[in-house]
Structures are given as structure tokens and as C-alpha cells.
Amino acid sequence: MYELSKDHEDFRAVVREFATDAVEPHVAQWDRDHHFPTDLVPRMGDLGLFGLVVPEEFGGSLEHAEGGAFTNLCIAIEELGRVDQSIGITLSAGVGLGINPILTYGTDEQKQRFLPDLVAGRALAGFGLTEPDAGSDAGATRTKAVLDDAAGEWVVDGAKAFITNSGTDITSVVTVTARTGTLDDGRPEISAIMIPSGTPGFTVEPAYHKMGWNISDTHGLSFAGCRVPAGNLLGEQGRGFHQFLKTLDDGRIAISALALGLITRMREEAAAYAKTRTAFGRPIGVNQGVAFPVADLAVMEEAARLLTYRAAWLKDEHEAGRRSVEEVKQAAAKAKLYTSEAAVTATRIATQVFGGNGFMEEYPVARFYRDAKILEIGEGTSEVQRMVLAKGLGLPA
Amino acid sequence: MNIVVCVKYVPDSQSERTFQESDNTVDREATDGLLSELDEYAVEEALKIVEARGGGEVTVLTVGPAAAADAIKKALQMGAHRGVHVQDDAIHGSDAVATSLVLAEAVKKATDGSPELVLTGMASTDGTMGVVPAMMAERLGLPQVTYASELTVGDGTVTIRRDGDTASETVEASLPALVSVTDQINEPRYPSFKGIMAAKKKPVDTWSLADLGLEASQVGLDAAWTTVVTFAQRPPRAQGQIVTDEGEGGAKLAEFLSAQKFL
């Protein structure tokens, strides 16, 4: 089995200090203003958060992690997520969707060009898979890229939806999946193409009006005759979707860590409030109607923690060649499914404990309540996780 | 340039702090300890100086119980190069005078008797006396330039800006020197992941009083020039006064402020 090492806990202490001092005081205002704090990103970079799974030659610290690199990333996401979910997802998407595909499939030239700035937090990158009419059903991708042989350029047309970190002032590139042909069996050939920000024909649509994650940067993207050099193909032509699938497990574990941070915070908030808020002359926590749900929060937190860090540990073990990808996939789906659903329940419990105050934005539980729901949807809905798990159990597809 | 930064391990100022009944000294068991926030500015300034000059070592020095190693660890994680921990049961209960003696001797030993620059915070967050830097400078025979809100290291000199209530002074001293810095001088960095991992491999020397050529009788509670005779918890803050505005709220407010001598 696994346990978090002293190094992991030392790292957690530093991220918690940063989250408490540099993030927490501002998040209520940022949330109200739907403000993405661009200045915070390089400070996260200084802590090394974007480089935890990246080799040193690109500015990262992978070689220093002594085998627990992905676990460290989860700790950072959990601790940021405990303070604010949007900041947590900014890191999670920045690494998992921005950096990872380039790191895994990029040529040396592509890595040298983009990674150092992304790792330092001087830039952010996005990944565009979802479309207005295609989510987990990637075969329905409509965005297309046609190679103009004469010009040596891809010409991209189409649209992408809900793309995190795609429209910040420092976004340097968005990798998108696009049809680049048709396979023998009639299915579309999907490839990944890197579109640098500012490329003519690449439009970042106005930010969405979301229920939560107000601090996170999310846009629709559209492409109209958008031309990029042929060399901007990321990985192999025709392997775009397959490549993306390989990053999904990481993303699901990262979302679990984000949900874990939220559940932890709800347990802390609800327990503290139940001790200090008085009604009828006694703290409300003396009532079992309040105390028992708070006790349940502690169980949810523990279960979420075990599922998340076991999945993270399996991922690190897989990287070291000791565990199979299928084990990681199943553990990731279990962790994502449980923690995200528990997160929604946890915010419901916490706001109930807070009573009328729980409905007020001056208490953080209201923000977390709005932020929780997306956890059951992003990186594969709960239903998709159950599909993965049922398939893993050998049920007929 | 090699710099020695003196730091203190203090009870977390965010938590309930108290004294222990047995000898009226700080109860270190009751609360978590950490590197005094005010000392982080001195560590940061030392790192900036060494980085700007492209060379030199930052040695972080503390005097304290076993747990004080955490203060050194934090400074090493930030980027300091090595640590010195003076730890000896006899030091327990030392006052500022004795503390400055131990620190001064440790600075001498750490620098083979010739320190180039010694940095400290402006005060500790627990004792908050702010006298140890001056006492150390005296013991080391170094010029003391204190409360620096800006620090420039020149050729054989240091120049600081000291902000007072009515004026800012620019003060220059020859090197070697001892400088205490304020919380206005910089913004201390957070350790990076690489820094955390690198700190594990950095050397930390642990010295006893004997290693410094000091006697137990020179330090500790018995040698202290002052004694805490008694202590009592501060009374809890009294309930605030609520003035219900019945058309004369402004006047009542002014009356209250005037009575408290705010007006």
C-alpha cells in the first residue's frame, strides 16, 4: 500500500502557507468580479507547482520527486482547492491539459518552445477537445484541419467549447483535436494541432457565464481559416484522440484531489460553525441533527483521501513500470466518481449547518456550493465513470 | 560574500500562546512553533544579496530546543546554504543578554572569527524586545545598523534606509557589519518544491555550549538579568458598546471617541 511521505507533507505545508496567505484573502472578491488573477500564475510557478511532473531540462523538478511526482501535484491541487476551487483547477488544467500533452507528445523543438514558459507560470496553455456538439463522444468532432501542402500549413475550421485557461492574458497556445481525414472504417481521423494565441482566424469567445468556478478562465473558441505551420501537429497524425485518452486518467485523479480539498474545507467549516454558533443558548453542534451530518463529513473526507491518494500512488507506480495502466484507469474512475459526488453532498451538508448564513456569499460555503457541481461533470461525468467501472468488471458493453 | 542570518524559532503568533507554570517561561509544548515571520525578511535579504553578487554562502543560525531545527529547515528550503543549531538544555530560560552571547560566539565559530555580514530580523514575534541585534553587534565589535527597510551592499560598506515617524535616514557603515531588517525590506519567497527537496541534503551543524567555549553558568534562567515573577492571562476582551441610533447616534459616537481620547 502507500502512505504520504515526510517530503510530501513538507511540500503540503508550503502550499498550504501559500494558499492561506497569498490566495485566500482575495478569492471572495475575485469570485464576485469573475476575475482571473493573472499575477498569481507566475507566483505558483515560483513554487514549482507547474513543474512537478516536468523534467528539469524544461524547468521542472521531476527528477527531485523521488518517485512521488504525481502525488505531489495532487497535494498541490488539494491544498489550493481547499482555499478555492477555481485556483485548483487552474493548476490542474494548466499541468494536465496544457503542459502534459506537449511534454508527452511534443517534438524537442515544440517542448523547448513552449514548456519553459508554461512551467515558470509565465504562460498558460489549454486543450480543446469538447465541442458544442461533441463531449465524451469524440468521434462526433466537427472541427477539421486540412493540410495545405503548397503552403505547408494546416487550415483549421470549427469550434471548441468550455476550454479552461484558453483566454487569459498569458495563454500562449491551445492544442485542439480536429478531423484530419477519414479512416477506412468511415470513422473520422482525429489529430491534435497546436494553435498559438493570436493566430489570425483563431477567436477566443467572451467568457462564459458560469454557476461556479468564477475565477477560472473558460471560453469557447472558434476557428475560421486559421492557418498554422504543418509542424504544429502534436504527436502522430490520426492519434489525436488516442493521445488524449491517455491523459484522461491523470485528469480524473486531479479532479479527485480538487474534490478532496473541497470536502476537507467543508468538514472544517461545518465543524467550526457547529461549535461556535449558538441557538437556544447552546452551540448548535450539541444537536444530533447537526452533529451527525458533520460526522459524516469526516468519513467522506477520509474515504475521498484514501481513494485519491491510492489512485495517485498507482499512477506514480505506473510511471515507474510497476503497475498497469488498467489499474490506474479503474482507480481513477472510482476516485473521481466517489469524491465528486461526495463533494456535492458535502457542500449541501455544510450550507445546511450554516443555515441562512450558508446562503450568504460572505461565508465561503456558498461559493463552494456553487463550485461543487461541475466536479460531477468535468473530466467525464459520473455516468462515464460508471461506464468505465462497469467495463472494468467485464459487463457487456 | 558570506552572510550569517540569525533566526528564532517561536510559538506561532496566530495561536493561543502562554507561559508554563513551572518556571514562567514560554510554553513551547502548547503551540506549534515556526520560523519567526520577521526573520524570514532577513533570510530573503541575505539570499537576494548572494544571488545578486553571484556567489557566497548564507548560513542560518539559531539557538533553541530540538524543535528549533524546523526554523533552520524552513530557511534552508528558501535557499540558505547551511545551518547551525546551538542546542543545549542549559540555555533554557536565557534572556536577551545571554542569547546574544551564545549567538555571538556561534557567529564567530561559524565564520572562523571573521564574519563579513550578519543579518537579523527587527525583533522576534514572541519576545519582541528587538535588543539582541544591538547586543550581538557589541559583543562582535561590529557596527550595528538597525531597522533597515532598504539595504545596499557596496564596496566595503553597507548602506541602509531607516524609516522613522518623521524622516527617513540613510545610514552607511563599514563592513563587516551587523544589520537588522524590517518587514518593509522585501517580500520573503515561499520555498519551491526543488528547494524543499534540496534542503534535505544541506549540512546542519549542531553545537553545544561546550563547542562554543561557554559555561552553563553564563546562560539560562539563573544567569538572566531579569526574571518573570508572575504571569496572568489577559482578561478576555470586554463586550463592545452598542449605541442605538435614535437620531443622536453621531453625537454619542463623538462622545465615546472623545472619552477614549481618540478626538
Image (cartoon, rainbow, N blue to C red):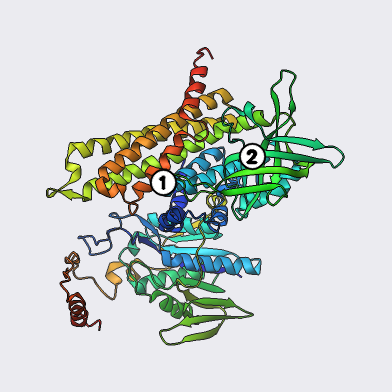
- Disc assigned to residue A124: none
Q: Residue at x 41, y 40 (%)?
A: A372
In depth, the one of B41 and A213 nearer the eye is A213
Q: Indicate the position of residue B204 as horizontal and vertical percent values.
A: 50, 56
Judged from the image, the secondary structure of the residue bearing numbered disc 1 is helix
State whether residue B216 is above or below residue A197: below
Amino acid type assigned to the residue bearing label 2 in the image: Ala
Q: Indicate the position of residue B253 as horizontal and vertical percent values.
A: 20, 77
State whether residue B91 is above or below residue B197: below
Q: Residue at x 24, y 62 (%)?
A: B19
Question: Residue placed farthest to the right in the image?
Answer: A150
Q: Indicate the position of residue B243 as horizontal and vertical percent values.
A: 16, 70
Name the residue that disc number 2 marks. A159
- The disc, 1 or 2, on the residue closer to the chain's N-terminal end is 1
Q: Residue at x 45, y 60 (%)?
A: B85
Left of A29 or right of it: where is B233?
left
Amino acid type assigned to the residue bearing label 1 in the image: Arg
Judged from the image, the secondary structure of the residue bearing numbered disc 2 is strand
Please indicate, yes or no, whether residue B180 appears anywhere in the rendered image: yes
Distance CA(mark 1)–CA(mark 2):
33 Å
In depth, the one of B180 and A397 nearer the eye is A397
Q: Indicate the position of residue A48 as horizontal and vertical percent values.
A: 57, 51
Task: Read off the chain for label 2.
Answer: A
Name the residue that disc number 1 marks. A82
Task: Read off the chain for label 1.
Answer: A
Name the quarter where the C terminus of chain B is drawn. bottom left
State whether residue B157 is above or below residue A333: below
